[in-house]
Amino acid sequence: MKKFTHIPALVALAALVFVGACSDDDDPVAPATPSNAYVRVLHASPDAPNVDVLVDGTVVLTDVPYQSFSSYLTVPAGARNFKVRATASPSTVVINVTPTLTKNNYYTVVARDPLASIEPWLLTDDHAAPATGKVKVRLVHAAPGAPTVDIYVTAPGADLATSTPVLTDIPYEAASGFLEVPAGNYQIRITPANTTTVAIDSGTLTLTAGQIRTGVAVDAPGGGAPFGAVVLPDRN
């Protein structure tokens, strides 16, 4: 049985620098083999209860709370059936999908939206190493209660009034590509679009060369503000 990890909303993107805090496994990345694909699951439905996850009818994760994610699950490539059900009510299946997974590829399945409209979001992860001396970061808007946002990546303490966002007008259910930035100290701030009102603030981050991370903006438990982020360790 794979383990999962929970990060409180207020931790936000500061967890980029703590690989060990993001997974119960020493290495979140399973070695690739020709016949397998690799899938991790993130519970990002703010008002949904704890859930179990089944792959091809076999329970692979149990009692997963909101804002928690698994390490990569090794599954045979091809068409795989994923079900998500309420832990307290195993007959209540809220997601039932059968995506086709390509061998050697890595994926993140995000259970998103409020419970009444919950659905899976399949993201393809990119584990190719960043250029020498750089870090790769992907940013995902999975907070249904948040507006369209701008994202600033600046030197610590930089004045947003004189800064330019690296991403603008990012709507709910949008994901950036992987951004490469030099290793070093940064501050990531997320604001409602066309404002400098900070909704999520990472504080000072020290990003180490070779890291790959996915930061997922999420609602508070139950939905709405205060918003936070779950940070997934893609590699290194």
Image (cartoon, rainbow, N blue to C red):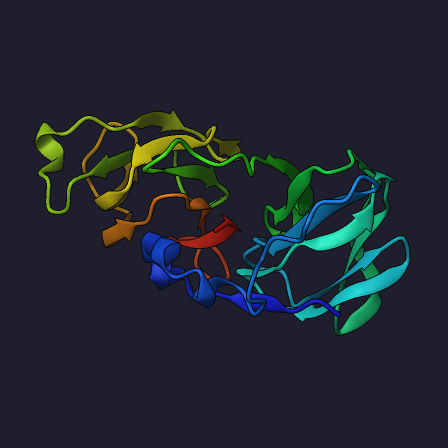
Quick check: 199 above or below 60? above
In the picture as drawn, the residue positioned furthest to the front comes out as 132
Q: Nearer the viewer, residue 196 or 212?
A: 212
Q: Position of residue 188 (x, y in %)?
A: 27, 44
Q: Number of numbered discs present? A: 0
Q: Residue at image x 37%, y 53%?
A: 16
225 left or right, relative to 102: left
Would you identify the image quadrant in which residue 122 lies? top right
- Front position in the image: 73 or 54: 73
Q: Position of residue 219 (x, y in %)?
A: 45, 53
User: In the image shown, does 154 or 159 lie closer to the viewer?
Assistant: 154
In this rendering, does residue 27 appear at all? Answer: yes
Residue at image position (69%, 43%) is: 120
Residue 92 percent coordinates (x, y): 82, 62
The residue furthest right is 57
Residue at 15% x, 41% y: name it. Answer: 155
Query: Where, by quadrant of the figure, is residue 60 drawn?
Result: bottom right
Q: Viewed as shown, does residue 112 lie left or right of 230?
A: right
Can residue 150 be seen in this snapshot?
A: no
Q: Nearer the viewer, residue 149 or 72?
A: 72
Look at 62% across and 37% down and name the residue there. 123
Q: Is residue 196 above or below residue 75?
A: above
Image quarter where the N terminus lies is bottom right
Residue 228 is situated, as x and y percent measured from the top left of the image, at: 38, 54
